[in-house]
Image (cartoon, grey):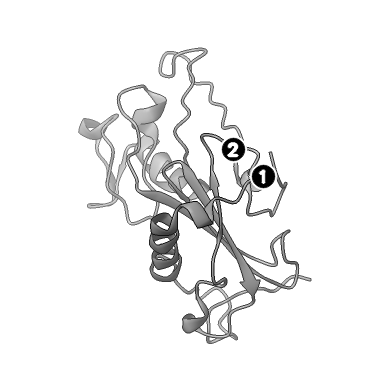
Amino acid sequence: LKGYKRSLHEGGIRVPFIVRWPNIVSPGAWNHKPIAFYDFLATSLDIANYSSGNNRVNPSNVYKPLKTFADGESFLPQLIGSSEIHRDFLYFEYCKPLENRHGWGQTLILGKFSAVCVGRQPQNTYDFPVCDVPLLYDLQNDLEQTHDVSAQHPDVVKQVMHLLKTERTTSSYNDNDPRGYYCGYA
């Protein structure tokens, strides 16, 4: 796969997730549906059988997905083989990604497509998306991300650009930066 840690390409975000849970997860089971780290909190809450609605453990909710305050979705049903996460896209952004050590990057996985958008570090919320046209890859036919197909799929590019602008949120992680764009390591 193209890229590695801190890359916006598949080599930087696609990693195996291995689970061993005797009598719950079937040995040797495979699932190719993508999940993201931000799904882990929702899944942990489900596994712990924690109901965020009333802040108490509720035994009647065992193996029923809970709607949580987190951005992610529980993948517990996927683990036990009862259903899969159904989402429209996965979104990631990095400050100083491998592709541009002095800039910003956004990645959106939308169905079979992966869009990689790299540009300068944003100065305000109007600076998103950080590129004019993303690199667009068809992951079904080009998992190695060697062929940009953005020119052949202008409708997908338009949808991606809209999502790259509207689906991100600023962070209050760095209170000294009123823009909320924390990029504090060298």
The disc placed on residue 6 is none
Estimate the x, y position of residue 121 in percent, counting from the top left. 64, 77
Residue located at (43% from left, 70% from top): 165
160 relative position to 59: left or right: right
Is residue 108 among the parts visible in the rendering?
A: no
Which of the 4 quarters of the picture holds residue 75?
Answer: top left
Picture coordinates of residue 128, whole percent (x, y): 50, 75
Of residues 13 and 17, the one drawn nearer to the viewer in this rendering: 13
Q: Is residue 128 above or below residue 22?
A: below
75 on left or right of 146: left
**Location of mark 2 (residue):** 142
Contact? badges 1 and 2 (CB < 8 Å): yes
In the drawing, what numbered circle is on residue 146?
Answer: 1
Q: Position of residue 176 (x, y in %)?
A: 60, 86
Residue 20, position in %: x, y? 53, 21
Mark 2 crowdedness (10 Å alpha carbons): few <14, some 14-19, many ≥20: some
